[in-house]
Amino acid sequence: MKKMTFGDELLQFARTVDILDEKLFMNIKEIINDYAKERWGVKFVKIMNLKFDLDGNRVLEKFFLREYSKGSEAHEMVNIETSRGQMAYVIKKKKPVWISAKDRESYLDKTDEYVDDWSNLQDIPEYQNITHNPQIKTSIIVPFYELEKERRYLRGVANYEISEYLPFSLSSQDEILTLTDTISELLNLYNVRERQEHNTNYAIERLQTKLETFNSLRRKNKIFIASPSNGRDDVREAITTLLEESFSDIEVVDWAKNQDTGSISQKLFEDINSSRYGICYFSEWAEEKQAYMDNINVMFEAGLMHSKFTTFNDEKPLWIPIREANAPDFPFDVQGFNTIVVPRDKEEKLEVKEFKKILYGFIQNMTHRLENDIY
């Protein structure tokens, strides 16, 4: 009967853990580091996860918690297809290696002749290390896997780096395999917890969005109109006239006509909070520039509307942006919903019928989407 080693104890513990958070993972990883250092003189235990980058390339990325952050010198990433390093080589071969210099004495970064005493692989590529003190004479790299529906999937490598030459032995081989299996188990548990946390956070965000929808449905059937005090009167008049003619059931709050005393900001928040919909006419004439510009106050009010006036099903904003032609680009992102560009003739007169027709379609679509916004 095989005597149980400390590595076996670690693996048995890992297989009994249900949930693995960051603190527990760090504690166990420190135990593994200390044991590997005491047993074989391991200087570094490096965990590299197999992933895909944004371009679809297979890469090995150093697993990190609080030890360092992405972008730091310690953040290591290896492209499997382009790298000539030893870890990429192990991924391609899917075999563990026990690498030392051919003369058994040289540091790995000081020689180009290597020997693999584990799998007897030939043509070992050049040793690469980004640490400041890469004085390593033995590098043991072991691929680890994840079991899913009775199939094994390659998930990365564990790299044990040792300052001195360590002769290969079957007992050390078995123990290092056990340690690597432990690391694999821990990573699987940690990744499951991360996925659960991500899914929980996503569910909470959806609930918050849904709550906003319910709040929208409970708000009064009001539409808040934001426009600059020196904006074109013809546009403002066409907006209010259309609402009176075709949407008389919607209460209109025209902020430009607000005459209330007291806190202006408090009244603004209250009016927007109690409304379901909004219209923002941004443009005002800048005499010094001889051009239309977006009014800063209207942009602020649009931001408040954008955070409040949304549906749950399509999450599109329930406010309508209106601007004059040839106005500069918005200083913020309004992609995903349309903007009404004020139609004018060659003499800069408002084409009232055309403008009302366009605005009518926008308002009808907006109110229809909210009315049908159910589960």
Image (cartoon, rainbow, N blue to C red):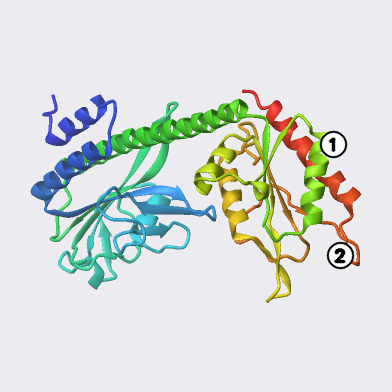
Q: Judge the density around disc 1: few (<14), some (14-19), many (≥20) Cα neighbours within 10 Å.
A: few
Q: Could you tell me which residue is drawn at 59 percent across and 40 percent down?
A: 272
Image spot of residue 53 (x, y percent): 48, 53
Image spot of residue 92 (x, y percent): 42, 52
Q: Mark 2 points at which residue?
A: 348
Q: Earlier in the sequence, mark 2 or mark 1?
A: 1
Instruction: State if disc 1 and disc 2 touch (CB < 8 Å).
Output: no
Question: Is 205 drawn above or below residue 76 in the view shown?
Answer: above
Dividing the picture into quadrants, the one containing residue 248 is top right
Along the line of sight, the residue nearer the viewer: 50 or 364 = 364
Question: Is 189 drawn above or below residue 340 in the view shown?
Answer: above
Along the line of sight, the residue nearer the viewer: 109 or 236 = 236
In this view, which residue lies farthest toward the left?
A: 38
Q: Name the residue under label 1.
A: 245
SS at mark 2 in the image: loop
Q: Horizontally, is 71 left or right of 252 in the view?
A: left
Mark 1 residue type: Glu
SS at mark 1 in the image: helix
Dividing the picture into quadrants, the one containing residue 75 is bottom left
Q: Where's the C terminus, which quadrant?
A: top right
Along the line of sight, the residue nearer the viewer: 283 or 337 = 283
Question: Is 263 drawn above or below residue 72 in the view shown?
Answer: above
Mark 2 residue type: Glu
Q: Where's the N terminus, which quadrant?
A: top left
Question: Is 243 drawn above or below residue 330 in the view shown?
Answer: above
Nearer mark to the viewer, of 2 and 1: 1
Dividing the picture into quadrants, the one containing residue 167 is bottom left
The answer to whether residue 91 shows anywhere in this view is: yes
